[in-house]
Amino acid sequence: MGSDLVSAFNAQTYHIHRIQSVAQIDDLLDEIQPIAMCFEYDYPESSDLLAFSESKTKHPSIPVVMITNSNSAMLAVWALRARVWDYVVKPCSVEDLQLRFGSLVRSGLPANDISFLLETSRNSKVVLKSRRYVESNLDQKIRVSDVASFCGMSRSHFSRKFRQECGKSFSEFVSQVRIGRAMDLLSDTSATIKAVSFEVGYQDPSYFGRMFRRYTGMCPSEYQKIQSKRLRAVA
């Protein structure tokens, strides 16, 4: 989070304790009694998720919010199964986060909200630029050669560099972004699976269903029902 966002939260009487080391978590929790923990990542690694799981296991009564740059369907499902209170993909506005944290207050928790941030910084210019292209053309056929040109690189250099920095092939990355966006769209219970399929670039709804199950472990209709129940519980 930038300092402007922190200031906005402070103005709303949110007392924020920022930390950058996993080792500080237990000490801070001994010192204060937070109503929420907020883990903010660029692109979380396994060690980051382990710290998240350990904190949730040790303090199961404290709601956890995950904020990340990674629009990964697998990460979203992992977070859901880890029972996070909310999962937020950046960029997001101050107003949006205020509403999300406000739901914690409405749920009956104390009003003097205290949260802390565990931040990691793993930006990759190639990955971030590629992601911008993919998200802007999600309903279209996305060619590696076009994205490589957009990044000012040859196709072979781009593919090699992308795998180096992202840890996966570009085609796998595109699939994850498509399914991640589909998960967002399916949170709207009025959205049809066919319409969502087309909007995220799958012209065959059956194939979309198979891809969705591959990344989430459930079919689109099952996921939509889960999200519907979750939204009713928060409201």
Image: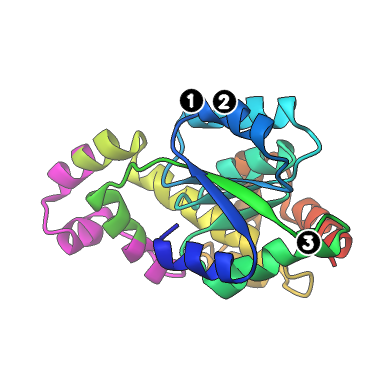
Which quarter of the figure is the N terminus placed in? Answer: bottom left
- From the viewer's perspective, is 174 left or right of 152? right
Which mark is drawn over residue 47?
A: 1
Tell me, yes or no, if residue 191 can be seen here.
Answer: yes
Q: Which residues are magenta?
A: 132-160
In the foreground, 229 or 197: 229
Which quarter of the figure is the C terminus placed in? Answer: bottom right
Q: Quadrant of residue 84?
A: top right
Which mark is drawn over residue 116?
A: none
Q: Identify the residue at image location x=51%, y=57%.
A: 178
Tell me, yes or no, if residue 211 can be seen here.
Answer: no
Local secondary structure at mark 1: helix
- Three-letter amino acid code at disc 1? Ser
- From the viewer's perspective, is 82 left or right of 165? right
Which mark is drawn over residue 111?
A: 3
Residue 92 located within the stretch drawn in magenta: no
